[in-house]
Amino acid sequence: MKLASGAAAILLGFCSLSLGLATTAHAQQSSTTRPATASAAAPTELDIPSSKQWVDTGLDLREGEKIRLTATGKIKYPADKKHPNGKTFDPDGLERSYEDLLHQYAVGEAGHGALIARLGAADAGGQAFLVGTTKEYTAPIGGRLYLGINQSMKDAAGASGNFHVKIEVLEAGLTTAEAMAAGGPADAPVPAITPELLAKIPRRVSDPQGNPGDMVNVLIVGSQEEVEKVFDTAGWVKVDTSVESTVVMAIFESLEKKDYLTMPMSTLYLFKRPQDYGFAHAEPVRVAMSRNHLRVWKSPYEVEGRPLWCIAATHDIGFERDQRNNGVTHKIDPAIDGEREYVNNTLSSTGLVARRTHVTPADPLIEAKTATGGSFHSDGRIVVLVLKPAIASAEK
């Protein structure tokens, strides 16, 4: 009996050890990925009242988390001369009409009054997208989910009704600290961006006459394909290169009932040549006087074996006198660092930025004037964004 008791004790100890190891392994696995059973959790349901443009869902999504949004309900806009009975619509919204070109909506090509969503606050670079009656969505980064209605504040003031939205988790997201952090990767040094490299990059661009202008305030590491993709994904559009193309494209865009955002920008120079690209990010209609825009040059340098791109980004906020010729030109926001961070936030929100950091060159630009005579000021820092390789992005 003593031998049997001893054997039982050994067997019991072995089982306890096995159970402990299994528990440890499970705990280690849980620290990196959300368990598959999370998809079985009860869905979140909430109402989006017609009086709101955006509603905080209270849900923080993780990178890679896949959800399904399903919406029902009706909203009604009050009667007007063209619609004596008002306009009633479901979460897909109303079909866009020519009069919608005169309004500002968060998603330019979505139906008027449609259900929309955004990952992250607007000032943190969250790009609004259409939900409609149903949509499956995978979070590219961690962030708070917001739901809204594709309408103006004037619409919201007179509307009635609401949309009821159900949100189901289809696939668990990662639970690493990086995956749960909102807004993209945390700032971390990029050793390849050395003081010697920064010294080779001009602090400012110039106009055709050689007058110094905007500050180089963003650097991007990546291929041409990767650069174009990150801007496109973030909702930036390429600008036209001539007034003639603007007129022609404006006609076609109006016929297609789209908001035209690609107004041309002037040619500036860096490395003794004009910009390779121009990109703009703006609200419809106000694009003529207010837009976020930037110019991109491929530098002659590489970082970690990949091209380095230099960017001068500014925010047009109106018009002012061009001191070179007394003509009219765009006035930029003098607090230029705000535009640097706008670019940083919008691009980082795509999930296509692997690393980012801020660097201060040995000769930082703190205060200066543009080529047209406008003034601006900065803390002198430059934001550096290292993009994910195209293959890795495609497989993600």
Image (cartoon, rainbow, N blue to C red):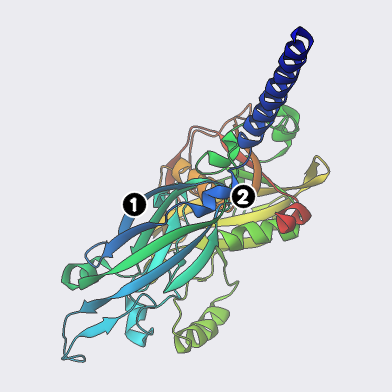
Query: Horizontal and vertical percent for residue 271?
Result: 72, 49
Is residue 212 at all visible to an observer of this figure?
no
Q: Residue at x 47, y 41 (%)?
A: 337
> Could you tell me which secondary element the residue under label 2 belongs to?
strand
* 207 up-or-down from 328: above or below: above
Q: Which residue is mark 1?
A: 56
Indicate the amino acid at tag 2: Ile
Quarter-of-image position of residue 20: top right
Q: Is residue 132 above or below residue 166?
A: below
Describe the element under mark 1 as helix, strand or loop.
strand
Task: State which quadrant residue 16 falls in.
Answer: top right
For badge 1, the amino acid type reads Asp
Image quarter hosting the C terminus: bottom right
In front: 165, or 300?
A: 165
How far apart, in angstroms, are the residues tagged by discs 1 and 2?
34 Å
Q: Nearer the viewer, residue 93 or 69?
A: 69
Question: Which residue in the structure is indicated by mark 2?
Answer: 311
Horizontal relation, residue 132 to residue 86: left or right: right
